Image (tube, helix red, strand yellow):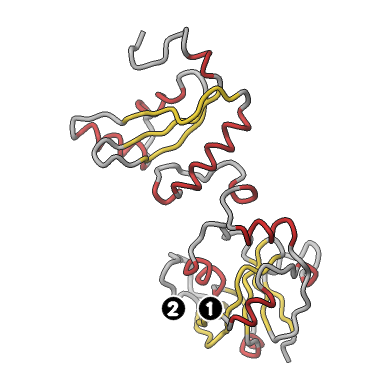
Amino acid sequence: MNPSLFSPAIAPQLDFYVYIYINPLDGRVFYVGKGRGNRAFSHLNDPGPSAKTALISEIRAAGKEPRIEVLVHGLKDEDTALKIEAAVIDLLGKDNLTNEVGGYQSRSHGRMTLDQIRALYGAVPVAVTESALLIRINRLYRHTMTDHELYDTTRGYWKIGPDREKAKFAMAVYAGVVREVYEIQAWFPACSTFTTRLLNEPADPERWEFVGRIADEGIRRKYRFRDVSQYFARFSQNPIVYLNVK
């Protein structure tokens, strides 16, 4: 038997567990996983190319081995293990790990601020009275994204007509709730002003992006974390709704 594996006497007693891989060269956690039996050791001989296997090769080239630790064990079902794994990934930050995907249900039940929790379960509908664009960003939104990432995700690039110039505000909307409000300052051709998004789309004269700033606090308090889902037509795929634009 491989001495690095759990023995047949030990493995069944662990039930489901969550484990971490630590880089001995700098002490940082670089992978989070869940499983049972000897799952924790399976990555040591993973043949596929990935950031994880590349880092393991780098560690071995320095004459070391990844350090594996069990974070929690004795879990009676996989669903619990998945949720703990997701919470650890959210805490450490996926960008700091070699995990290829985020944690289980992390978008709907993962790490959130108190305001995001309140928005999820108790957002109050609001009537929009300013000239504004509601911009739905469901596909790209993450609860843990930075302010700058949210700004760049909201501002482009969109297939949008000349009436864009009449809107004073742009509201980032996820799951029917306003996440941030921006005062639009100018519009530019698509892909010309980004700093955090890597876009490899072909040039399209019908697509635009705006530059702006976070709206004044009074406007933010009025709309942020409020429900605007009533303005989106059911089954509509259009991510943008014009309001009070004349």
Query: What kind of residue is marked 1?
Result: Glu
Residue that appears at 72% across and 88% down: 245
Cα–Cα span, label 2 and label 1 = 8 Å
* Residue 215, x across and y down, in percent: 58, 81
Side of 130 relative to 29 (left or right): right
| Secondary element at tag 2 | loop
Out of 197 and 91, give the one closest to the viewer: 91
| Secondary element at tag 1 | strand
* Residue 196, x across and y down, in percent: 43, 67
* Residue 64, x across and y down, in percent: 22, 30
The local crowd at label 1, few if under 14, some if 14 to 19, many if 20 or more residues have their Cα within 10 Å, is many
Q: Decide: is 166 above or below 220.
A: below
In which quadrant will I find the C terminus? bottom right
Q: Please tell me in which quadrant of the rendered image residue 170 appears.
A: bottom right
Looking at this rendering, what residue extends furthest in the left direction?
62
Contact (Cβ within 8 Å) of mark 2 with mark 1: yes
Query: What kind of residue is marked 2?
Result: Ser
Q: Earlier in the sequence, mark 2 or mark 1?
A: 2
In which quadrant will I find the N terminus? top left
Q: Please tell me in which quadrant of the rendered image residue 129 appears.
A: bottom right
The image's mark for residue 209 is 1
Side of 107 relative to 231 (left or right): left
Residue receiving disc 2: 192
